[in-house]
Structure formats: structure tokens, C-alpha cells
Amino acid sequence: MIIFDLNCTHGHRFEGWFDSAEAFDRQRDAEMIACPVCDDVHVDRLPSAQVRVPRAAARDNAPAEAPDEAEKRPEHGDVMTLPTEVLAKLRAIVRATENVGSRFPEEARKIHYQEIPARAIRGQASREEAKELSDEGIDFAPLPPFLTKDTH
């Protein structure tokens, strides 16, 4: 497995695990990789600063005290670093909404124009549908995929 640092066009950084660089390229070209924050499928690899050291050399030259790994990690607002309890609460809030699937734009309009009683809903909308809803003044927010999946 190879771990790549990835970046979407909106500047969100996250990790991806792949069998090889070629596997990453195939999945990216097929738009199978999406940003966990904004669901953007336009993802690129970031340069990696990892250096591989042979085990014998690493053991011989190991410092007396290794610096804390958390201090070496860049802080980039990756939501996957949220505490487990916070993620669980966010997922519980999402599960308390009604999943209307592809009917989301239609249901959101009915609620907005008070044709049906207001309720918390979630679902899917294309970029074009989302733009139309926004242009109509209908408030909604995209959910990152990690909130709509039960396992991670």
C-alpha cells in the first residue's frame, strides 16, 4: 500500500491509500476519488516528503528521543482528524434526517415554497440542480461523504 497526500481544487487536503501510483491514476481518471470535505472529484497528488531509509541504517542512526509524530504532521484542517465522539455526533445528526435520494431538489423546493411541512432532509443533487436551488434562495449544504456512511 502507498499513502498519498491529496488535494482537491478547493484546497482541502486528505490522504488516500492505493496499491500503486498507477492505481491512483486509474481511480482519479475514473473519478472514483472524491474529497471527503466537498465531494470534489478533481483531485491531485501532493509532493511527498517521505524518505525511505533501509532498516539497518535507521536502527543504527536512530535519535535517542524521536519527536512527537503529531508535532511533525502539518495542520491542514483535515476533518478526518476530528475526535471520534464528534464524528459520531455528526453522523447521528445526519441519520436523523430523511434521505430523499435523487428527489432532493424537488423536496427542497416543496419545503421552501411551503407546499409541504418542513422537515430535515438529505439527498443527492447534480451541480446544476444545486446551482438552481441556490439561485432560488433555497438554503442547503453539501454533506461530505464520510458523514453519510456508517462505517469508516
Image (tube, rainbow, N blue to C red):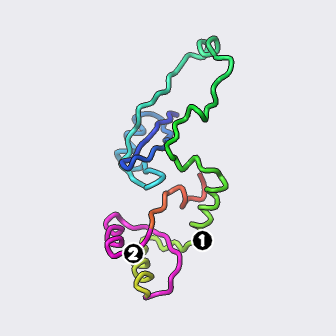
Q: Does the magenta stretch include residue 39?
A: no
Which residue sits at x=54%, y=61%?
148
Q: Position of residue 6 (x, y in %)?
A: 43, 41
Residue in front for this viewpoint, 68 or 33: 68
Task: Please tell me whether residue 68 is drawn above or below residue 145 in the rendered image.
Answer: above
Which residue sits at x=46%, y=69%?
123
Residue in front for this viewpoint, 102 or 130: 130
Amino acid bearing label 2: Ile
From which residue to which does the magenta span run? 115-140
Amino acid bearing label 1: Ala
Residue bearing mark 2: 138
Q: Earlier in the sequence, mark 1 or mark 2?
A: 1
Image check: 5 left or right of 65? left
The residue sitting at the bottom extreme is 115
The number of discs equals 2
Which residue sits at x=53%, y=79%?
119
Task: Please tell me whether residue 62 is drawn above or below residue 86 in the rendered image.
Answer: above
Q: Where is residue 43 in the image (x, y as percent from the top left)?
A: 38, 45
Give the spatial CA distance, label 1 vs label 2: 21 Å
Task: Please tell me whether residue 128 is drawn above or below residue 76 in the rendered image.
Answer: below
Q: Is residue 137 magenta?
A: yes
Image check: 110 left or right of 52? left
Q: How crowded is mark 2: few (under 14 residues within 10 Å), some or many (20 or more)?
A: some
* Mark closer to the observer (1, 2): 2
Q: Where is residue 2 in the image (x, y as percent from the top left)?
A: 50, 33
Residue in front for this viewpoint, 20 or 8: 8
Residue bearing mark 1: 96
